[in-house]
Amino acid sequence: MQLSTLVSFMLYIGGTIALVSGVLQPPREFLIAVGGSAAVAFGFALKDVAASLVSGLILLFDRPFQVGDRVAFENVYGQITAITLRSVRLQTLDDNIVTIPNSRFITDVVASGNMGAMDMMVVTDFHLALDADLERAKEIVRQVIVTSRFAFLKKPVTFAIEEIAIAERLAIRLRAKAYVLDVNYEKAFQSDITSRVAQLFLEANVKRPMIK
């Protein structure tokens, strides 16, 4: 089908040129002017392609990310599946393939979660009431993380505690930072932590923020 489309396109172009030159027989100066205009238009059409090709060469040498990395680009997040001279293919967590021109990665900000490593930090937030037992909550989250089959325990588990507003009410955000042993288990790791912590918070009567 691609070959048929290409052949049809070439036949249309060739037939149009033959019709104009054979039937209308325009003067030579007119043909030169039309040819020059067509060349300029063709150059502008290939400008973005040429920029992507040059950017592809830069990516090959600079290596800001590799195939298999989890990257975030604008509102797209997923795993790099291919890096070509023209574009980068990214597979989202919803199993969609997104193709991004290489030139976009040269001018815009891109974040790589693992930079070629198998493990990657996974950040999971838990929200607590202002009068909740923070030490008890931290201990529960830590125990859940270290007993998860997806956790990479050679790197530390850390926490960041911050007071934030949820639905116009103040609450405590307990942010857990832990490493998953393989980037392919990122969401499974986060789901495992979230579900088990929620159940243990209920059993331990750890207070959660009240919502209007």
Image (spheres, grey):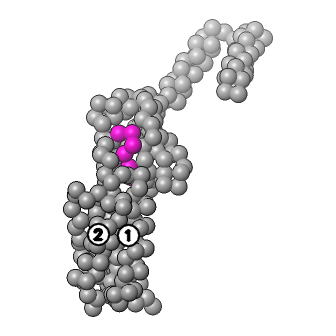
Mark drawn on residue 176 = 2
The quarter holding residue 68 reads: top left
Residue 175 at x, y = what percent?
A: 29, 71
Q: Is residue 69 magenta?
A: yes
Q: Which residues are magenta?
A: 66-73
Farthest residue, direction right: 23
Q: Nearer the viewer, residue 124 or 185?
A: 185
Above or below, 201 relative to 20: below
Instruction: Write the residue at 63% across / 8% down.
Output: 28
- Going by the numbered disc 2, the residue's amino acid type is Ala
Q: Is residue 111 visible?
A: no
Q: 16 or 27, which lies in front? A: 16
Please tell me whether residue 168 is drawn above or below residue 1 in the rendered image: below
Query: In the rendered image, which residue does mark 1 sit on?
Result: 193
Within-10-Å neighbours for mark 1: few <14, some 14–19, many 20+: many
**Residue 5 position by quadrant:** top right
